[in-house]
Image (cartoon, grey):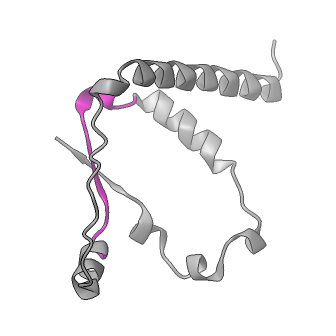
Amino acid sequence: MTQPKEQDEQDIEEFTRQIDEVVQIDSDNESTISFGYQLLPQDDEEEEEEEEIKEAMEIELDPKDELDAKTCDFIKSVMSRIELKEEAIPDWAKTIPESAWMPKIVKK
């Protein structure tokens, strides 16, 4: 029987292997993937640009790209263990609520 720590390490290794597979698949299809590149405006109208930036980012997710609940829970579990030292977080970042910078996922 594997110990809990060994099981966590095995889970992380398995997750890493799965991510590597996804990256490999994505790199194989690289020529067909559109990243939505758009040239930024080159004018001096800063006020207009500031208004556009205030809106939260939205990501459209194609149903075929959705992760199953088990994988989502595993990712959340791994990421919940990541901690930054307090001194590593800039003062300005401490004043911004998480809801303001987290992207929203829009289902089609």
**In terms of depth relative to the viewer, which is nearer, 15 or 76?**
15
The magenta stretch spans which residues?
54-67
Q: Looking at the image, how many numbered discs can be counted on the residues? A: 0
The residue located at (24%, 74%) in the rendering is 52
Q: Is residue 108 above or below residue 82?
A: above
The picture places residue 74, in percent across and down from the top left corner, at 56, 34
Taking the view exactly as shown, the residue that stands out farthest to the left is 108
Q: Is residue 106 magenta?
A: no
Q: Is residue 14 above or below residue 39?
A: above
The residue located at (27%, 58%) in the rendering is 39
The picture places residue 35, in percent across and down from the top left corner, at 31, 42
Q: Is residue 44 left or right of residue 108?
A: right
Q: Is residue 58 magenta?
A: yes
Q: Is residue 47 above or below residue 80?
A: below
The picture places residue 91, in percent across and down from the top left corner, at 64, 82
Q: Is residue 91 left or right of residue 97?
A: right
The picture places residue 100, in percent across and down from the top left corner, at 40, 71
The residue located at (23%, 84%) in the rendering is 45
**In terms of depth relative to the viewer, which is nearer, 76 or 48?**
48
The residue located at (49%, 29%) in the rendering is 71
Q: Quadrant of residue 33?
A: top left
Q: Is residue 98 above or below residue 44?
A: above
Q: Is residue 103 left or right of residue 21?
A: left
Taking the view exactly as shown, the residue that stands out farthest to the top is 1
Report the quarter where the N terminus lies: top right
**In terms of depth relative to the viewer, which is nearer, 33 or 84?**
33
Q: Quadrant of residue 93?
A: bottom right
Report the quarter where the C terminus lies: top left
**In terms of depth relative to the viewer, which is nearer, 26 or 89?**
26
